[in-house]
Image (cartoon, rainbow, N blue to C red):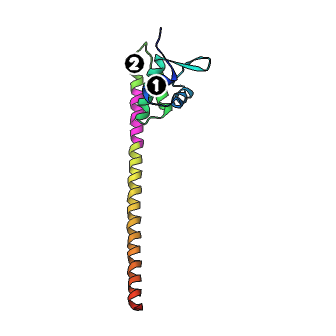
Amino acid sequence: MDTQYSISQLSKEFDITPRTLRFYESRGILAPRRQGTTRIYSERDRVRLVLALRGRRAGLSVEDIREVIDMYDPTQPDDARQTMVLLEKIREHRRELINKIKDINETLKAMDEIEERTMEALNRKAAVNTNQLAFEL
């Protein structure tokens, strides 16, 4: 008999909420069988959950994760297609992150320039106000 897991067992084991499990189910990553309203997860579901959580930590989208996981064929474990697709997804995500880092750095530089100009304007205004006070005394 295959190992079976309840929603609470998997939630506890992976420190995730039942809602997260239901989310992965709604996205086609997990496919528990039903016994009335109770979800019963298989060892296959557990492995797919492990892979999904790893993929999310790596920053992959749920759609990309499902695509990679769905490619796996246990009858052909040496098939490199899944590995190549995963590698391309990782490279694509890396490019996106590098572009985001560039955007953030450009934004920070612009903010530094605005802050510097603003401080200069405040200093000029403070100097004018100080000179006005000297004339009034």
Q: At 39% across and 36% down in the image, what residue appears?
A: 91
Give percent across and percent down for residue 137. 39, 91
Establish if 36 lies above or below 84: above
Secondary structure character of the magenta stretch overall: helix
Residue 28, quarter of picture: top right
Q: Give the range drawn in magenta.
A: 84-96
Calculate the distance from the C-alpha at mark 2 to the C-alpha at mark 1. 21 Å
The residue that disc 2 covers is: 79
The label nearer to you, 2 versus 1, is 1
Instruction: Count numbered badges in the picture.
Output: 2
110 or 92, which is in the foreground? 110
Give percent across and percent down for residue 41. 51, 19
The residue that disc 1 covers is: 49
Q: At 40% across and 32% down in the image, what residue appears?
A: 88
Q: Mark 2: which amino acid?
A: Asp
Q: Is mark 2 on a helix, strand or loop?
A: loop
